[in-house]
Image (tube, rainbow, N blue to C red):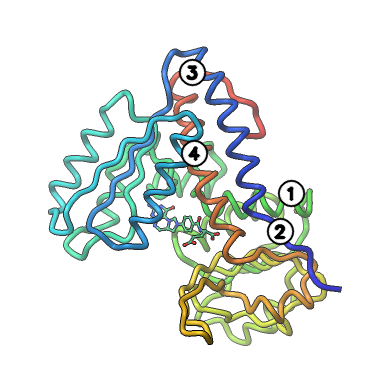
Amino acid sequence: MTARLIDGKAAAASLRATVAAEVAKFRSATGRSPGLAVVLVGEDPASAVYVRSKGKATVEAGMQSIEHKLPADTSEAELLALVDQLNSDPAVDGILVQLPLPPQIDANKVITRIDPDKDVDGFNPVNAGRLAIGLPGFVPCTPLGCLKLLRAELGDLAGKHAVVIGRSNIVGKPVAMLLLAEHCTVTIAHSRTRNLPAVVRQADIVVAAVGRPNMVKGDWLKLHATVIDVGINRVEGDDGKSRLVGDVDFASAREIAGAITPVPGGVGPMTIACLIRNTLVSAARRDGYQLPEDL
Ligand SMILES: Nc1nc(=O)c2c([nH]1)NC[C@@H]1CN(c3ccc(C(=O)N[C@@H](CCC(=O)O)C(=O)O)cc3)C=[N+]21
């Protein structure tokens, strides 16, 4: 039997509709709209596409989108000054500085400068620390999207063995922290892991976030494992056209997995839905407004 497809596009549409309904209530209660500031430095075409879809999702949810496009030669000091200005702007509830940044700018410095209580990306060290020790804060959007898909698919995750492949600060580490908080047994595998297929074969849940096209093969999987593919790799197909593939070899994996996310249409759309979710959560916290617990 082939795996169930986990429809991230549908789950994202549903989360976005829920957020939009809550934004409408927030607006009538407080008289203002949540605001998300997105900062793009330079003109990397992929980043420009993402920033556009974030802006569109923000407006569709009834929130205010504040876009700052800066030239590629912007200095670190100029970007830090903009972050300071957004930190102190009461209309701004969320700040996202699109990564990657040009080489003259130290991304860690910029991320650290964002007010942790406006850090809807959850990349500031304060929010990474809050997640690690179980305090409320902002959880990075892609990991949160993965968790929401897993909960919808599996329900309670307690006791499941999750193998996270990849240890980045933006996906691997935070997704591992979230799964640990859900009482999973968590293994973090990476490029130096020995006998990766044997490690992955132990997993009830596989989260692949390494950025290597089609790396995880079907015969690495335990029968009926749940597979979350975070990879978004642009590759050239047999027809010479470019297409998106994940970190999981979808064709072989779907024959063994119990459920699997496609690429595109899996985790990606959830990332954006969670961004607008985090922005609403930020606005609500800043105004002392009560949202439903399970948003
Ligand atoms: N500060 C910061 N925060 C981010 O969250 C952030 C970032 N920088 N830099 C770039 C990555 C990438 N990212 C994606 C968002 C949506 C899709 C998405 O919607 N993907 C669609 C298709 C996209 C397509 O067709 O190109 C899908 O997978 O179905 C993918 C990737 C957010 N990022």
Real-space CA distance between mark 1 and mark 3, rounded to the nearest whole angstrom: 29 Å
Judged left or right of residue 60, residue 12 is right
Pointers 1 and 3 in contact (C-beta within 8 Å): no
Residue 230, horizontal then vertical, whole percent: 56, 64
Q: Which residue is mark 1?
A: 152
Q: Residue at label 2?
A: 6
* Residue positioned 62% across, 52% down in the render: 9
Question: Along the horizontal axis of the image, is 280 left or right of 37?
Answer: right
In the rendering, at what x and y percent does residue 168 appear? 46, 65
The CA span between labels 4 and 3 is 15 Å
Q: Which mark is residue 222?
A: none
Q: Nearer the viewer, residue 44 or 287?
A: 44
Disc 2 packing (10 Å; few <14; some 14–19; many ≥20): many
Residue 199: percent from the left, percent from the top?
A: 68, 79
Q: Earlier in the sequence, mark 2 or mark 1?
A: 2
The numbered mark, 1 or 3, whose residue comes first in the sequence reads: 3
Three-letter amino acid code at the position of disc 4: Ile
* Disc 3 residue type (three-letter): Arg
* Residue corresponding to mark 3: 27
Q: CA distance from mark 4 to mark 2?
A: 21 Å
Residue identifier under label 4: 276
Q: Are marks 2 and 1 in contact (CB under 8 Å)?
A: yes
The local secondary structure at tag 3 comes to helix
Q: Earlier in the sequence, mark 4 or mark 3?
A: 3
Q: Give the residue type that dot 1 points to.
A: Ala
State the quadrant of the N terminus. Answer: bottom right
Residue drawn 16% across and 54% down? 71
Q: In this image, 58 relative to 219: left or right?
A: left
Tell me how far mark 2 sits from mark 3, CA to CA.
33 Å
